[in-house]
Amino acid sequence: MKTKSTEMKSKTNWKKLNAMKDSEINFSDIPVTDAALFKKMVVRMPKPKELVSIRIDNDVLEWFRHQGRKYQTRINAVLRSYVDVHSH
């Protein structure tokens, strides 16, 4: 069975965008970024992941690997969903 990649693909027309001049770009919907804005910002670093060794059935691991890059992140997301559903 052929699987479809789950990675998001850009819908941006890069050729058209790269051909535009800076003066043609509409910035009206972008908020002003000034010193006041940066004073309100808070940097939130992601929690570090713990490196572990785990035994996984070969077919399960291969299935995730065939989903493409970041397969370990997807495994973590599946486990996270399980924990969220089964936590009270």
Image (cartoon, rainbow, N blue to C red):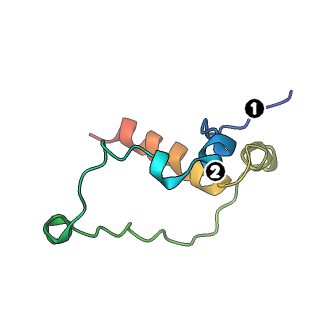
Give the side of residue 84 with respect to residue 35, left or right.
right
**For mark 1, does the 10 Å Cα neighbourhood hold few (<14), some (14 to 19), or many (20 or more) residues?**
few
**Mark carried by residue 4:** 1
Decide which of 26, 35 is in the foreground and name it.
26
- The residue that appears at 45% across and 40% down in the rendered structure is 81
**Callout 2: helix, strand or loop?**
helix
Name the amino acid type tagged 2: Asn
Q: Label 2, on which residue? A: 18
- Please report the residue visible at 69 percent of the width from the left and 59 percent of the height from the top: 55
Q: Around disc 2, counting alpha carbons within 10 Å, would you say few (fewer than 14), some (14 to 19), or many (20 or more)?
A: few
- First of labels 2, 1 by sequence position: 1
Amino acid type at circle 1 is Lys
Asked where in the image residue 63 lies, by quadrant, the reply is top right
- Left or right, 36 with reference to 29: left
The answer to whether residue 7 of the structure is visible from this angle is no
Q: Position of residue 70 (x, y in %)?
A: 65, 55
Q: What x and y, as percent, mark residue 35?
A: 17, 72
